[in-house]
Image (tube, rainbow, N blue to C red):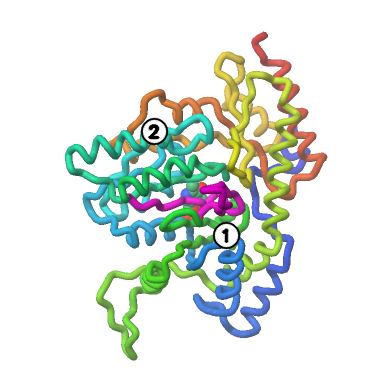
Amino acid sequence: MENKNSQNRLWLSPPHLNGSELNYIQDAINKNWVTTAGDNIVEFERSLQNFTDSKYVVALNSGTAAIHLGLILLGVKEGDEVICPALTFAATANPIIYLKASPVFVDSEEQTWNINPVLLKNFIIERLKINKKPKAIIVVHLYGQPALMNEIIAISKEFEIPILEDAAEALGSYFYYNSNKIMAGAGSEIGILSFNGNKIITTSGGGALLTNDKKLAEKALYLATQARDPLPYYNHQEIGYNYRMSNISAGIGCGQMENIENKVLIKRNIFEFYKNEFSKYSFIKFQPEPHGTYSNHWLSTILIEKNSGITPEILRLELEKKNIESRRLWKPLHLQPVFNDCRFYGENNVAENLFETGLCLPSGTQLNETDLQRISEIIKKFIQKNLIS
Ligand SMILES: *Cc1c(COP(=O)(O)O)cnc(C)c1O
């Protein structure tokens, strides 16, 4: 019988703690500052500010919390429409529902797999005709690949609809806008990051809200810390949230940020490795990186053409048999039972096709040359055995 654990398990994108995380945690404990205030939070926010070139950063306890607060700051209320990409993680859209607003899921384009600007514009024009202006546009940089931001920002400006940039997967990615280099998350009214365990850096769990608007940053901090008035007693005029990051988590983040540049380079090298290994197979395609964009390649993702005889699911099962974790692409949100009643705006089922043909390969920053060879050999062998030629 095959021993599943004869070789160590390779995970999709596990946490990688290799800096001075422990020193920062120790410092928090020594100073008895383990709550939602302290030096690590200040330091972590400052390092994110510098790295993303964003004026204000508010550290929070999840990326989802950051999206929730971001939508509140953009004025999203009950009954409003919020535009959201169809191909993303449910956490992008869930906060729309928290606010009793309605998501409208817009299909992907094929150049970056992100929200299609042509459909986005057509949808907005359609709604304006009946005087129903969408309240906000959520843009996601999927697997680290920046969306077509030049087109999307132009639409946002033309119709005066603000953007919330979900850069949960894209810390370290960037795009050019008017020949300026803009870091993912810092190119819109509001950006958000996630530091969940599998993201490019982690704080064990956490997120951040980015903005260049001082008032919005102050409001985010106020709402994230229970909306207390500055009075000697507890006084509240608004509903608040308990969304602030702890000083312990921020300490992990400080240690992680020491290596962010290196982590991006390693992720990009992993992507290049797979690309070279599979370049001889014309039916395998990689997530494109158009000119003027730079992806952190958080996850290396491939598409396997439908008539090749190999589906992402049988390849995933084969890798699983060999104790290697891979994962299907996000199942589009308009196909999720929980969003059954929500509107989908698309034409050619681009997101659905990406889901049906795509697979995320192991992309952890601790994968070494031997691990990568092991993954590649298994895939190549499997292809040779199963390919319809
Ligand atoms: C991970 C992720 C989130 C949610 O972040 P959490 O920190 O897990 O709450 C939101 N959007 C996208 C695209 C993500 O990948």
Q: For mark 2, what is the residue? A: 118
Choose top left, top right, bottom left or bottom right for residue 229.
bottom left
- The span picked out in magenta is 161-185
Q: Quadrant of the N terminus?
A: top right
Confirm whether the magenta stretch covers residue 253: no
Mark 1 residue element: helix
In the image, residue 265 lies at what x, y percent?
71, 49
- Apparent side of residue 170 relative to residue 367 in the rendered image (left or right): left
Please say if 347 is above or below 251.
above
Q: Secondary structure at mark 2?
A: helix
Residue at the extreme left = 130
Q: Is residue 242 visible?
A: no
In this orientation, does residue 77 appear?
yes
* In the image, farthest residue toward the top: 389
Q: Quick one: label 1 or label 2, which is nearer the N terminus? A: 1
- The residues tagged by marks 1 and 2 sit, at their Cα atoms, a distance apart of 28 Å
Asked whether residue 183 is drawn in magenta, I would say yes
Number of residues whose C-alpha sits closer than 10 Å to that of mark 2, classed few (under 14), some (14–19) or many (20 or more): few
Left or right relative to 154: residue 101: left
Q: Quadrant of the C terminus?
A: top right
> Which of these two is toward me, 144 or 126?
126
Q: Which mark is residue 40?
A: none
**Residue 97 locus on image (x, y percent):** 31, 50
* Residue at the spot of label 1: 52
Please, what is the three-letter code of the amino acid marked with disc 2?
A: Val
Q: Are marks 1 and 2 in contact (CB under 8 Å)?
A: no
Comparing 39 with 249, the one in front is 39
- Percent position (x, y) of residue 52? 57, 60
Q: Nearer the viewer, residue 254 or 73?
A: 73
